[in-house]
Structures are given as C-alpha cells and as structure tokens.
Amino acid sequence: MTARADVLVAQLGMWHTMPLAYAVAFGLEGPLLFVVAYVKERPAVERLIALAPVTACFWTLTVARQAQTAYLYWHSYVVFYTRTFPPANETIFQRNVLPPVQQAADAAAAQGWETVALGMAMLALGVGLVMRWATARAKPARAAETQRLQEVGG
C-alpha cells in the first residue's frame, strides 16, 4: 500500500470509532433524561423531547456502521491490489484506486463532523432540559406556599 492509501484507510477507521463513542453517550443521555423527566412528572411532550438523544444514537450507529463497511471494503481492496499487481502499476493505482478511496474518506469525515455537531446539539438539549426542570421545580413550590399563606391568612 502506498503511504497515501494507508492514511486514507486509517481515516476511515478513525471515523468509525468516533461515532461509536458518541452513540454510547447518546444512548446513555436519552434514557437518563427520560427518567428524570418521569420522576419530575414533566408533561408528555418534554418526555418525548428527552428521548431525542436515543434517536441520535440510532443515527450515529448507522454512521459508524457505514464507516466500518467502507473501511473494511477499501482496506481489503487496497491490500489485494498492492499484493496482486506489480509495483509498476503504481500510476494505475494512483489514477483508478485512490480517488474512490479519497471520496469514501471524505464522505466518512463529513458524516463524522455531522456527528460532532449533533453531539453539541444533544448536549445543549440536555442542559436546556435540566435547567428548565430545575427552574420549574422552584416555581410551583413558591406558588403552593403563596396559596397556603392566603388560605391561612384569609
């Protein structure tokens, strides 16, 4: 394998590992948010919104699977090509094999960066929901206390 092909195939492998880590994080965040929403007796809409990271987990697992498939295909193809054909065919390899490998690596990188952006969005969603629930807890307590004071004084 040429050095450039090695780098491209390694990129495909890296873009498989990184979405898996995000999928694990999303897979833990979604149920955790849902349980907190259930315990806090939040409305059904907020409970459904709390499950958004689970959907992100499934999408991210799909991205990781696509990157793994591309990695396995191109790794085996490049190894087969370099072991089967003599080094004199290097120009044919550069012209016919490397561009599709580059396209696969670029597609995996694009989906990987989309996964990173989705991770930031799910983090913001989780923080937003927790902050909303934390502030919503204080408001009903003050309202109930005010109502009790009005009943006692009134």
Image (spheres, rainbow, N blue to C red):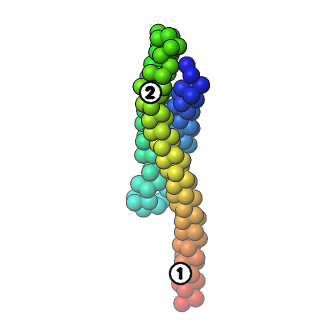
**Residue flagged by tag 2: what amino acid is it?**
Arg
**Residue flagged by tag 1: what amino acid is it?**
Gln
Residue in the picture at 58% in, 76% down: 142
Picture coordinates of residue 60 (x, y %)?
A: 46, 40
Q: Nearer the viewer, residue 97 or 112?
A: 97
How far apart are labels 1 and 2 at the CA level? 78 Å
Residue tagged 1 = 147
Q: Nearer the viewer, mark 1 or mark 2?
A: 2
Left or right of 139: which side holds 51?
Answer: left
Res. 27 visible in picture: no
Q: Is residue 112 above or below residue 96?
A: below
Residue tagged 2 = 95
Sequence-first disc among 1 and 2: 2
Picture coordinates of residue 25 (x, y %)?
A: 56, 43
Residue in the picture at 50% in, 50% down: 118
Looking at the image, the residue that sits furthest to the bottom is: 154
Picture coordinates of residue 120 (x, y %)?
A: 55, 53
